[in-house]
Image: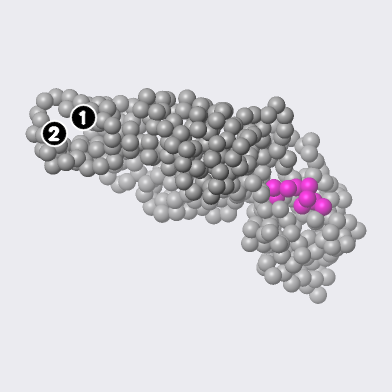
Amino acid sequence: MRFLVLIALGIIVAAHHGAQADEEISFNRDVLPILAKSGCNSGGCHGALAGKGGFRLSLFGYDPQADYLTITRESRGRRVDLFDPGSSLFLTKPTTAIAHKGGKRFDVATGDEYKILATWISQGCPPYNPDESPIEFLEVSPSESVLNLGDSRTVTVTARYADGTSRDVTRWCRFTSIDETVATIDERGVVAIIGRGEGAISAWFSSKIALARVVVPFATQIPPEVYSNAPRNNVIDDLVLEQLEKLHLKPSPSANDATFIRRAYLDTIGRLPSPEEASVFVADRSPGKHERLADLLLARPEFIDYWTYKWSDVFLLSGAKLRPNAIDAYYGWIRDRVSINMPWDQLVRELVTAKGSSIENGATNFFAVHQDPETMAENVSQAFLSLSIGCAKCHNHPLEKWTNDQYYAFANLFSRVRAKGWGGDPRSGSGIRTLYSEDSGDLIQ
């Protein structure tokens, strides 16, 4: 009986909305966000590698064209019934009119999801339109909130499209709290403050992510002059004091000389000062001794040793992948750049555009460690941008702004990197390769 009632409701809803709708329901703007919001195309449901119950969707809707064909053409058309929308499996399963292992996802009486999907089916299932204006970015409002313990606030998410239009998509966003010790957020976008500090919430919609910050000051009352009179040596101090004032936190006192020299030695040359070095520094009462210590540490050979080791780790210098002559050249190249204090942007440019012999130009060994465009792109991103983009190789990244298309566009930058000589077997061969770039060739997605 319940099944028949739901079918009847579906027919009525579909007919009503089909007649009254001001505009056509869009598959990518309207249908896919509903699936993502409800979790239907998440990694634990139909978006899993093998799908569920024979129904497989792309993870979080990263492949709209394939999803459209899966929904409308597979299973002999039973998933959508254009003549009787209410009997479509696409509606009866998530409303549990028919048994659904994933549980109830839509509510017929109170939810907009059912109405939109029923309208879409009644309109003949308009397909994904590649010419439809894409989303350029999301905006979360307010972008920053200063709240107190126990407060709550609703955020609004607006999608801005390339054609200049905008749309409130709060209802269809997936929200996440970056620090749940400070704030939580529910599926409606209501932020609840449960702790003090600074947190953030992220909003995800149609492969776009936006952040909003939440500041919850501590209950202490600190006079403004504490911050204005605090010692400042550079712009970093200005930023730190600005943040402390925002959170109502009292600045920490300056470190004593024994603490300062220990931290300075560890940060610059990677070891503790000797007892004699520490005693001399603490006993020194002359002005400017902290600056002089920094200059002396930066000029010591241990500084070059320590930071060459650090960058060798970042650049994946390893005997497991490189032959001894290549390692020697690669290490020497890194050490030379550290010793001359080469600016970071110049070092990166020289590395990623390196050409020539792997034992004459050590930088070329970066591309011996990574010998295909995808791993080259992933390691360049990780080393120089602090971004892990590996997830986007198979689908739109669920946590970052990277899409599958952007992943391959970035990897294609390395598609013409070629090498002659040693093939990369660490067990044999001289390790000598000659790196060059081709004039043609692209990575096929």
Residue 67 is covered by the magenta coloring? yes
Please name the amino acid that badge 1 sits on: Leu
Q: Nearer the viewer, residue 328 or 271?
A: 328
Residue identifier under label 2: 281
In terms of secondary structure, what is the magenta stretch mainly? helix
Residue 43, quarter of the rendered image = bottom right
The C terminus: image quadrant: top right
Callout 1 environment at 10 Å: few (<14), some (14 to 19), or many (20+)? some
Q: Is residue 7 above or below residue 296?
A: below
Residue 235 is covered by the magenta coloring? no
Residue at figure coordinates x 51%, y 27% from the top left: 350
Provide the secondary structure element on which disc 1 rests.
helix
Residue at figure coordinates x 22%, y 42% from the top left: 272
Task: Judge whether residue 220 can be spotted in this image.
Answer: yes
Task: Judge whether residue 214 can be spotted in this image.
Answer: no
Q: Which residues are magenta?
A: 61-69
Q: Is residue 183 left or right of residue 120?
A: left
Residue 282: percent from left, percent from top? 12, 35
Please name the amino acid that badge 2 sits on: Phe
Q: Is residue 274 above or below residue 105?
A: above
Specify the color scheme: one colour
Q: Nearer the viewer, residue 98 or 410?
A: 410
Residue 431: percent from left, percent from top? 54, 40
Residue 236: percent from left, percent from top? 33, 30
Q: Is residue 356 left or right of residue 181?
A: right
Provide the secondary structure element on which disc 2 rests.
helix
Residue at figure coordinates x 41%, y 28% from the top left: 337
Callout 2 environment at 10 Å: few (<14), some (14 to 19), or many (20+)? some
Residue identifier under label 1: 293
Disc 2 vs disc 1: Cβ atoms closer than 8 Å? yes
Q: Is residue 86 above or below residue 315?
A: below
Residue at figure coordinates x 33%, y 33% from the top left: 304
